[in-house]
Amino acid sequence: MGYLNNSSIIVDAILTKKGRELLARQDGSFKITQFALGDDEIDYTLFNENHPNGSQYSGEAIENMHIIEAFPDDNNIMVSKLVTLPRGTTKMPVVTANVSKVTLSLGSSTVINPETLNLNGVSTLKEPAGYLATIADRRLLTTFSGVGTNEATSTNRPYSNSSLSETIKGSSFNLTAISSTSLFGTNNRLLTSITIEGIESGARVTIPVEITKEVIAVTATQAQTGVTLR
Amino acid sequence: MATYNRYASDDIVISTDRVSTSTWSNNTNNLEVAYTASSQAVFTNATSSGAFRIDIYNLPTSSTSEEVQYSVSYGHRKGSGSLDFTNDTGSFGFSATRDIYSQYRNLVFGTELTDFTFDTVTPDDIFVVNVNRARYKQNLKPGTLNFKLTGDNGEFLFTDDSITKTGSAVITNIGRQFNLVSGSSGVMSGSTLGQTASGSYGLFYPDAGILLFNAAAVSHSVGLEINRGSNANGKNNQKFYNAISESGYFILDSEEKITSQYYFTRVKNQEFNYTTNSSFIETDGTLSFSSMNDNPRTYITTIGLYNDNNELVATAKLSQPLAKDFTKEALIKVKLDY
């Protein structure tokens, strides 16, 4: 990765990994219809409110920054987005979830239930438009579905021997870990992450996900003999 | 409140442009010096690779970054000039040069019943310069060919007649066909296509990357001795390459059509003046800078292009952060090449 020539104002786009995948599918899912703006590498603590030359120079350090070239990892670019809010807003929306980390054993399930603080003057609420959940490695889940909004989605994943992300919509999200140990190799756990973003607020939270190779013994009911392993 | 803005139909524009570059590796304009590989240009027996073609490299093969630029072949309709695969009754004339002639004849005409004719003359043999596929993008660019051969009769400069010729090119099974003529940069010397008693100099197929020379005409003009003996290890392609190498002048461009999609990204004054950047806010969402309460200022560095499922399919970066507040608007043109 190199530095962009800052004497140039040409803006060339590159396809992300997800873009390449969708383009290869040739099912129309690649079609670009909307945009968002990001400021990933900006550190606003460089904004100097007390600049000796006056407030016009407050952004001097930021405005002279040399920007790094775009890279194709859709999970790690556009992490912080610019949002449209009414003038005078003093508190930005913040997305929280019912869990700070997800740990699943083989075949087990959980639900992630996000909420948004400070949205439209309300301290805590579910965003009416729902949330986007993006898992960095979809192979680790057998079920990854959104519930609770009209646009809740879940798709079948193409076979892949490397990680592929998937983004779904919903107001809460069901996750079920894989039952097979084929992806583990010699590892005892597999790690990925889920990023949940409020569609309206743009605020996001990233939750680490850990799938353990652990085999859980389930207590047998009276009529059964032995122990069921899963 | 919004994070994603939809493009209007007139915000997306498709444009197709032709881009041309030099054909040779490292964008070398004139392939002045070239090399063969002793391991490839072998003529030991009838099936040796050199009997079919000689690969020409931009660097010595001892280098780690040499690349094949083009190959040189000699073809004969009756198989003369190379050793028979089996020199016996019933298989005389079945040799590498016959393979070559038949191969290109089938490629161009799609039939074994038509032979190469160069302005009414139908010779038995051809020289072929086949530009390596990796060297040109979509096709060779007609009108850019400048190719010299040096022989006993001196130095001769050849080109195609794409600029001199009026009207459309002849279309063959391997795309457009122009004539190879004496001249430079697509302009023919004189007004007669049949520049020798042996017919015109050859044919140029830019879409397939092939220059196909009339061996009789070239040998007559340039002064190149061709061994047309039956079951003879003639090494005629090597003689032809020597004539190329001695002149050290081979200029040829390639071109491709690039389809670009332009996304006119319009950022209005009321939009995108706040950010979810963690350095902009405290953990509870409060803005980090009191001066931003009334007049927030953000900096655009990245444009994300999304589909209807909010999946990030393409991304672009600005060369410098672009300040945005309630008094500023921006129009950013994002270009995506296919």
Image: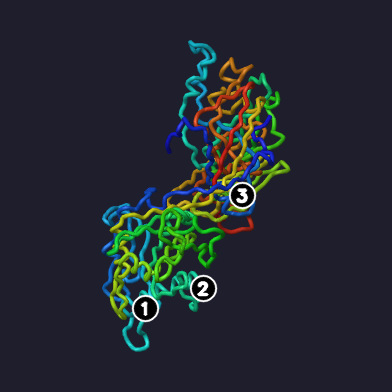
Q: Mark 2 lies on which chain?
A: B
Query: Residue B163 — which label?
Result: none
Report which residue position mark 2 lands on.
B110
Secondary structure under tag 3 reads strand
Query: Do callouts 2 and 1 mark residues in contact (Cβ within 8 Å)?
Result: no
Q: Can residue B22 be seen in this view?
A: yes
Q: Which residue lies under the disc numbered 3?
A: A143
Q: Does mark 2 fall on the same chain as mark 3?
A: no
Between marks 3 and 2 in the image, the one whose residue lies nearer the viewer: 2
> Relative to B61, does residue B305 appear above or below in the rendering?
above
**Mark 3 belongs to which subunit?**
A
Across and down, in percent, residue B133 comes to 43, 59
Q: Decide: marks 3, 1 in contact (CB < 8 A)?
A: no
Identify the residue shown where x is 36% and y is 63%.
Answer: B71
* Of residues B106 and A138, the one drawn nearer to the viewer in this rendering: B106
Amino acid type of the residue that numbered disc 1 sits on in the rendered structure? Gly
Local secondary structure at mark 1: loop
Density class for disc 3 (Cα within 10 Å; few <14, some 14-19, many ≥20) is: some
Give the residue pinned by disc 1.
B79
Provide residue B94's location: percent of width, then percent of height. 37, 80
- Mark with earlier residue (2, 1): 1
Image location of residue B274, percent across then percent down: 61, 25
**Mark 1: few, some, or many residues within 10 Å (few <14, many ≥20)?**
many
> Looking at the picture, which amino acid does disc 3 mark?
Thr
Q: Is residue B285 left or right of residue A3?
A: right
Task: Give how far apart the Cα atoms at labels 3 and 1 are.
Answer: 66 Å
The chain to which mark 1 is attached is: B
Disc 2 marks a residue whose amino acid type is Gly
The image quarter containing residue B121 is: bottom left
Q: How far apart are marks 2 and 1 (CA)?
A: 20 Å
Where is the N terminus of chain A found, in terms of image quarters?
A: top left
The one nearer the camera, B88 or A168, is B88
